[in-house]
Image: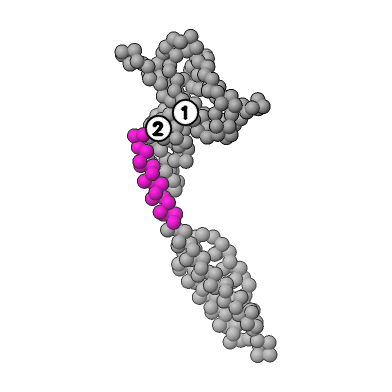
Amino acid sequence: MNIDTSVINNINSNTSTAGLSTRQSAELRESFMTLLITQLQNQDPLNPMENSEMTSQLAQINTVSGIEELNATLNGITQQMDANQALQASGLIGKGVMVPGKHVLLEQDSDGSTYTTPFGVELAEPAKNVKATIVGEGGQVIRKLDLESLGAGVHSFEWGGENDQGEAVASGRYSVQIEATDAEGEAIEVTPLNYAVVNRVTPNDGGDSLRLDLGAVYGQVSLDQVKQIL
């Protein structure tokens, strides 16, 4: 007599998911042991269960217990990681960060001083030539910058708020376009970055992750979108 394979399959299918509760695991073990005892009581004396078969079936119930303990351990690790992530995110409040985007803000004080937010680039690989173009809201080219060769990774830069003729431009929001090529002149994947200040940290709509609020201009981003802290 063999244990009903549908029960074993049910055990395997349930334990393959990470959501086994203690009650579900206990019920599965109880069902397994009931069937195993019934099998031993009703086995054919002329054809008893072999030791290897008994060992295999006992191993399956031990697997259920082991997965339950593993799930509990992983759940604890996940909670600790979430707590660490929340602590890390809260430490960014009030700080400037570089996130994917192409905006550059320019402001002029009453004394004539000009302030521009940094812009940046993330390169998938080293680049021989990198060029940035500052563009106005109407699409007009304001300034062309030669950033020369850059290694792979994240880089940030400052624009002085002047056009190609060296004249100060008006306050407002500008954008930056970046092109990069390798030594053979082939285009390289680039991600433009803009500067923003973290105002607050809020949970995601699903409640499983955190979002950084960067204000009305930049909206919200996830923590993994922060490429650099300034």
Q: Residues within 10 Å of mark 1 (few under 14, many from 20)?
A: some
x, y (%) of residue 175? 49, 22
Q: Residue at x 63, y 72 (%)?
A: 5
x, y (%) of residue 2? 64, 79
Q: Residue at x 64, y 79 (%)?
A: 52
- In the image, residue 43 sits, relative to residue 13, either above or below, namely below
Say which element carries label 1.
Answer: strand
Residue type (three-letter) at the residue carrying disc 2: Leu
x, y (%) of residue 60? 57, 72
The stretch drawn in magenta includes residue 178: no
Residue type (three-letter) at the residue carrying disc 1: Ser
Q: Which residue is mark 2?
A: 230
Q: Earlier in the sequence, mark 1 or mark 2?
A: 1
Quadrant placement of the N terminus = bottom right
- In the image, residue 48 sits, relative to residue 146, either above or below, namely below
63 or 204: which is nearer to us? 63
142 or 14: which is nearer to us? 142
- In the image, residue 77 sits, relative to residue 179, either above or below, namely below
Farthest-out residue, left: 111
Q: Which residue is mark 1?
A: 156
Question: Taken as a whole, is the magenta stretch helix, strand or loop?
Answer: helix
Q: Residues within 10 Å of mark 2 (few under 14, many from 20)?
A: few
